Amino acid sequence: MDFFGVTTLLLIACIVFILLSIMQARKTKGRGKMPPGPTPLPILGNILQINGKEVFKSLNKLSEKYGPVYTIHMGTDPVVVLCSYDAVKEALIDNAEDFGARGHMPLLDRISSGGHGVVGSNGERWRQLRRFSLMTLRNFGMGKRSIEQRIQEEAQFLMEEFRKSKSQPLDPTFYFAKAVSNVICSVVFGDRFEYEDKEFLRLLGLLNEVFKGFSNVWGQMYNVYPKIVGKMPGPHHKLFNAIDGIQEFIKQRVQMHKETFDLNDPRDFIDCFLIRMEQVIGNPLSHFHMEAIVNTTFDLFGAGTETVSTTLRYGLMILLKNPDVEERIHQEIDKVIGRNRAPCVEDRSRMPYMDAVIHEIQRYIDLIPMGIPHKVIRDLKFRDFLIPKGTTIYPMLSSVLRDPKQFKYPNQFNPGHFLDENGKFIRNDGFMPFSSGKRICLGEGLARMELFLFFTTILQNFSLRSPVDVEELDLTPLMSGFGNFPHYYQLAFIPR
């Protein structure tokens, strides 16, 4: 290419750059006094200032310069970041209605087919789906005796699997995924799966691929530039294929239910949804249809499997690194429950140390550090700033769980954060692993039951041993993006 050709291209590039800068300036003009933040580049925004492998750390670092409420640009879109317990509480709790909508997240749109699930929807659709889902889960025992029995039974299946290992080291990843998933599967699909069921294992593999895909760099870039990245080759297509595979499985299950369900005798969540769909046939304003049942079921199945199983896996690694904590738990279990009966939820009130350890595990691992995006539903004055309607909000749960005003040793694992001087369990307002406000996790009650019963049953029956020196175990996340995921490791379950 000759000199004039190169000069022409550079001139065109400069003109495009200037035009984009003007467009971005106009886009933000008239929005009022947005929170301060780093100056964005055209098109790129502030993504060059964010470490793709540790997004939440980058955002927390920016708050040191710009304060607990600041603005960044993800591509061309402004995002308000909330960093600290006080800022998150003021938004999600004190102004719950204004900050109660789901924010922009293209990967979530990909799962929910544009907002047809309970997690990704907004407005009246969200209210109807959430109300229905909560009511149905409660009817099938969430927070009641029946779901407790399902968890207890599944915990015994899991103990049998660990006994089969004969104290040999194993990777617990898919053992926990199978057990935890079977609890929600029994509620959603009406059945549990055998641990060696090939279709079940394939499904869990797809789900693991989805959650890893949400956190890797390609998934995060898709959230910023979905139209561009979606057309590019790359590992993110494994994520898309995994989403499609899970949705196809759910569609098949829905079809099976359609052929056998009884309007007067619902067996599970899908049956209840089909009954509601029958009741609203002909109503053009109804939010109960095929897309909704598939995506809401996806939400329950996905969130009900990966979050709890990852917490169990991370938690046992922490106990390997803290044998004194494990020993104290053994003592409390032997005193309160003994060895001859299964743990039950009622035991939790008499086991303050165990309760404190589980809370501290959830706080320390910081599973979903950035939370799931919110957005404001109207032009809003927040502190000394004006936030325009529709602005995406990142409530940094990581900044809450490690707020030094709430936790004395924010970067250390210390069950004492949830114990008073007499060893009694105490609550802490900064404990927000399930988020808070109107968008608090739908399955919080179920997750709390599962964590207590699985952890307690495991430690009632086994002592934990690492095949390598515990100093070699790395508690820093293997991957940090949407979620913090632990390194893969092995441990041996030694019968007590």
Image: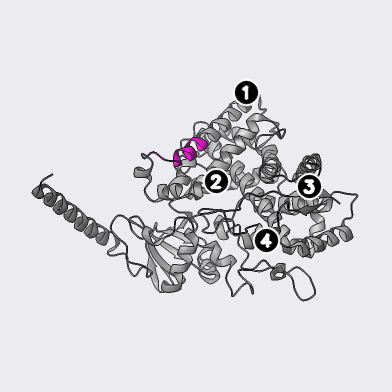
Q: Which residue is mark 4?
A: 471
Question: Which amino acid type corresponds to the residue marked 4 in the rendered image?
Answer: Glu
Which residue position holds label 2?
A: 211
Residue in the image at 54% along x and 31% along y: 248
Task: Give the class, few, some or many, for how many residues have Cα within 10 Å of label 1's Cα (few <14, many ≥20).
Answer: few
Around disc 4, counting alpha carbons within 10 Å, would you say few (fewer than 14), some (14 to 19), or many (20 or more)? Answer: few
Q: Amino acid at mark 1?
A: Glu
Q: Nearer the viewer, mark 1 or mark 2?
A: 2
Badge number at residue 160: none
- Magenta stretch: give its range: 233-243
- Coloration of the structure image: one colour
SS assignment at label 3: helix
Kind of residue sitting beneath label 3: Arg
Sequence-wise, the earlier of marks 1 and 4 is: 1
* Vertical order, 352 against 233 (above or below): below
Q: What's the distance in space between the residues labelled 2 and 4, CA to CA?
A: 28 Å
Describe residue 218's horizontal placement relative to residue 397 as left or right.
Answer: left
For image coordinates 42% across by 63% down, the residue present is: 80
**In this picture, is 85 found above or below 143?**
below
The secondary structure type at the circle numbered 2 is helix
Q: Residue 206 appears in which quarter of the rendering?
A: top right
Mark positioned earlier in the residue sequence (4 or 3): 3
Prevailing SS of the magenta stretch: helix
Residue wearing tag 1: 259
**Mark 3 neighbour class, 10 Å CA radius: few under 14, some 14 to 19, many 20 or more:** few
Could you tell which of marks 1 and 2 lies nearer the N-terminus? 2
Circle nearer the N terminus (3, 2):
3
Cβ atoms under marks 4 and 3 closer than 8 Å: no
- What's under tag 2, amino acid-wise? Phe
Q: CA distance from mark 3 to mark 2?
A: 31 Å
Left or right? Give the position of 487 relative to 152.
Answer: left
